[in-house]
Image (tube, rainbow, N blue to C red):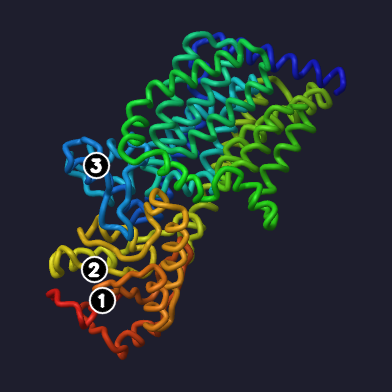
Amino acid sequence: MTAADRVDRDRSRAVAARLRRAAPLDGRDLGWLALALVPGVVAVGVYLATNPYPAYGGGLYAQIAAAIAANGYAPPATVDSYAATVPFAYPPLQFYVFAIALDLGFDPVTVTRLLPGVAVVAALVPAYLLGRDYTGSRPAGTATAAMVGLNPQVLEWHVSAGGVVRGFAFLYALTAVYAGYHVFTGGGRRALLGGAVAVALTGLSHPTYALFVVASYLVLWGGVDRSLGGLARGLVVGAGALALASPWLAWVVTTHGLDVFSAAAGTHGGLGGGLDALLAGPSWVRLVPLAVAAAALALRRDATVAAWVVAATLLFFQARFAYAVGALAAAVAGVGVADRLVRREGRALGSPDRRAAAAAGLVVLATVVGGAAFAGETTSTTDPTTPSFLDDESVAVAAWAAAETPADARFLVLGDAAEWFPALSGRSIAVGPWGVEWASATAYDRQLAAFRAASTCETAACVESAVATVDADPDYVVVPTGRYTVRGVTVVEFGTLERSFAVADGWTRVHENGGVVVYRAVEYGGVSG
């Protein structure tokens, strides 16, 4: 590191120290914070304009919320209507919020379409604060938030239907990390209390995001503190969060035992899933954050943020965590570039106000370009970022099932609309992985394989063979025609499967609506319309 680099680093650290001692926000932040929120508002606006139905799945969450409301807000032991009886061991906070929304009269589709956007925009506040305080630069804080708000790897899992849980878990996690940074840089009691509350909220919302917070605290302690006092402060935050979450943990353990956690931990990549994915075959999605970390290390000598990106990349199969930290690393690298340009060009770059205006212009330009790119993805026929599981026909067939089939009828719904079917119809599905991870990792893998196989079959015999692997015996089969999704990937059915069921022994057509055809098992004695 050159002498000039050390001067720049020390100057930024001094500014960051002043920011840490000040109130979280003051008048000088308002313009930069407002600009930081614009990318999130644009992204949410594009999503709502291009998605008449929520993206991805939220039906299981809606079913859990309905069960909570029906149980008088006491936690239900199990949630029914899916392929396996689901133990209610989910962190409960956001399900209670969802239940309140249902009790207020909102339908679940509307809640899962609109509520996640609130979390997407709100999460940019702690993203801005973390970027500002870590770099000692308000423009860098805005850039951090903008890169979080417009990154598809982060956005698609928070603005979509599951964002009623994940989006808010991300908001709480970023708040916890921001507080944690101050815990390890002398933030005092306010940081300790805020950290404990935010970590508890994260843990009461989503286990993976809680693990991300724990990993972040360890990296921050190792990178900016490394003292016994800092370790003690981190433990105080953890103990406080554990105390706040202990009523829920005690209820889960006494109701379901500890095995329910080990079952879920073996699915969705598990801890270390990112490393497994890299070893299986490196892809640009996972290499980009590592390249940004290398840039922060080279341009700013920031080993802490570089190590943080590496940890997030290797520990978590979900790339959104690496990209969230990567946004901070990119801001750090950007500050390094700006400092070098100032030293090299000097007066040619103008006053600090002009440099700030240039930074704001870059954020606006990135928002326009990023928003346009996001709009292009969401309006494509395959929509890789925010594919909707529902459409008019799938909603209509659920309404038909609710009105015209026995309450104990079990359905095999092909395609991702199956996840929503119980919440919209009040009927059970016979095959599907949703919630099964809380029963066992083996059962989850079997259900996922059977669902994928059945949903991509071209013959009735293929479907029957696939569901037999999980001993399912559905009374009805819902066959989509045309375009639908399987695990978020678009599939086009040209009528081959429909025609196969039409001539297959043991099935009779009982309903169709232009996008879906329903067949009933001949041996089933239920009444249909």
Q: Are marks 1 and 3 in contact (CB under 8 Å)?
A: no
Disc 3 and disc 2: Cα gap in Å?
28 Å
Residue where numbered disc 1 is placed: 518
Does residue 39 appear in this view?
Answer: yes
| Relative side of 519 to 198, left or right | left
Placement of 515 over or under 37, stated as above or below: below
Quarter of the image with the C terminus is bottom left
Q: Are marks 2 and 1 in contact (CB under 8 Å)?
A: yes
Extreme-bottom residue of the structure? 503
Residue where numbered disc 2 is placed: 397
User: Foreground residue, 76 or 180?
Assistant: 76
Q: Residues within 10 Å of mark 2 (few under 14, many from 20)?
A: many
| Relative side of 180 to 520, left or right | right
Placement of 513 over or under 96, stated as above or below: below
Q: Are marks 3 and 2 in contact (CB under 8 Å)?
A: no
The numbered mark, 3 or 2, whose residue comes first in the sequence reads 3
Does residue 26 appear in this view?
Answer: no
Of badges 2 and 1, the one in the foreground is: 1
The amino acid at mark 1 is Val
Residue where numbered disc 3 is placed: 76
| Relative side of 323 to 287, left or right | left
Q: Secondary structure at mark 2?
A: helix
User: Foreground residue, 192 or 228?
Assistant: 228
Q: Residue at x 41, y 78 (%)?
A: 465
The amino acid at mark 2 is Val
Disc 1 and disc 3: Cα gap in Å?
32 Å
Extreme-right residue of the structure? 2
Q: Secondary structure at mark 3?
A: loop
Placement of 124 over or under 507, stated as above or below: above
Q: Residue at x 60, y 16 (%)?
A: 231
Where's residue 255, x and y in %? 30, 38
Q: Residues within 10 Å of mark 1 (few under 14, many from 20)?
A: many
